[in-house]
Amino acid sequence: MQLSRLENGQLLRDEQLKRVIPHRSTYEERWLFIAPHDDDIVIGGGLLLQQAVREGKRIKILITTDGSMGYCNLEQKDSIADTRRRETLESFAIIGIRDVEWLDYPDANLMRHIGRRPASGEQQRAKPEEIAGFTGLQNSYTAHLRRFRPSHVFVMSENDYNPDHKVVHQEVLISLFHAEGAIWPELGEALDERPHVYEMAAYCNFKEDPNVEIAASTAELEQKLEAVYAFQSQKQIGMLVENLKLNGPYEYLRDAGFNYYSPARYRTLFRRKESGEGV
Ligand SMILES: [Zn+2]
């Protein structure tokens, strides 16, 4: 596998992940993938995952939705969530990953679960995750970030037509802020180091250009396609697999450079202007 990273105009190439997706914190290296849907991560990162498994990285997959809206015929309507759960475990097993957890928020309805609220009085069919008497995406993500204590967090890009993707991206980033702070102590001990955040894409192009490339072999692409094919209940998967085949054994990631507002970063902009005007 040929791995590349663009940084400050330099192109770094390696066959190992350490230069391309560096681990700079003092935390043990732990990769947490947070997805809206069960199939997003193998579609966007099935090649990356194979390399990470080979290098022995500790990997956890968190799937936000229950998959209940993914039925393609009416007979599947009541059983689709269970079917997809089986397919998901099979798909990740092909890549060699077993740590998969669902948060069970209702598929195609994450907009109603933004934030955090007391868990009682929620009237719905899905049973979204409840921790410490609260529910909501920020409750779940904050608790899981504090529990798993990742060095790296991977999310799907927010530049997607699917609103579930936009919501997860937005809620994970604010939850990283919560997880580092003292807020909501019942959700666990605050993180003392900020994880690196990377974005992956599955259905739409990135908002800003990616800076990491994974160039794999045909055999590795075949393994990824096999993992994608495991989602047999998703009838649209055939079209997707064709697209993945056409694009070859390549994947891209973007280091989101997750950080907070720093006015110092902008000072030089105005200094340059001042000298340009001869003041
Ligand atoms: Zn998705």
Image (cartoon, rainbow, N blue to C red):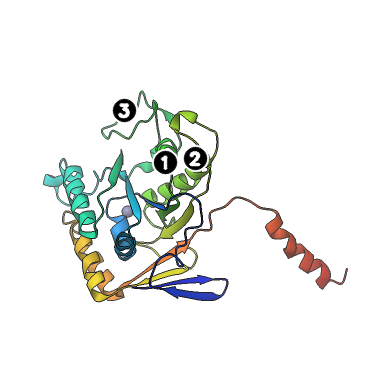
- Distance, label 1 to label 3, CA atoms, is 21 Å
Q: Residues within 10 Å of mark 1 (few under 14, many from 20)?
A: many
Residue most toward the left?
Answer: 75
Q: Quadrant of residue 65?
A: top left
Of badges 1 and 2, nearer the viewer stands 2
Residue most toward the top?
Answer: 120
Q: Which residue is mark 2?
A: 179
Q: Quadrant of the C terminus?
A: bottom right
Of badges 1 and 3, nearer the viewer stands 1
Going 43% across and 29% down the picture, which residue do you hit? 117
The kind of residue on which mark 2 rests is Ala
Q: Quadrant of residue 252?
A: bottom left
Q: Which residue is mark 3?
A: 123
- Asked if residue 105 shows in the view, the reply is no
| Marks 1 and 2 close (CB-CB < 8 Å) | yes
The image position of residue 92, as x and y in percent, is 24, 55
Q: Is mark 2 within 8 Å of ligand 1?
A: no
Q: Secondary structure at mark 2?
A: helix
The kind of residue on which mark 1 rests is Tyr
Q: Quadrant of the N terminus?
A: bottom left
In this rendered view, identify the residue nearer to me: 201 or 251. 251
Q: Secondary structure at mark 1?
A: helix
Looking at the image, residue 162 lies above or below residue 142: below
In this rendered view, identify the residue nearer to me: 278 or 14. 14
Residue most toward the right?
Answer: 279
| Marks 3 and 2 close (CB-CB < 8 Å) | no
The image position of residue 75, as x and y in percent, is 11, 45
Tell me the tag on residue 141. Answer: 1
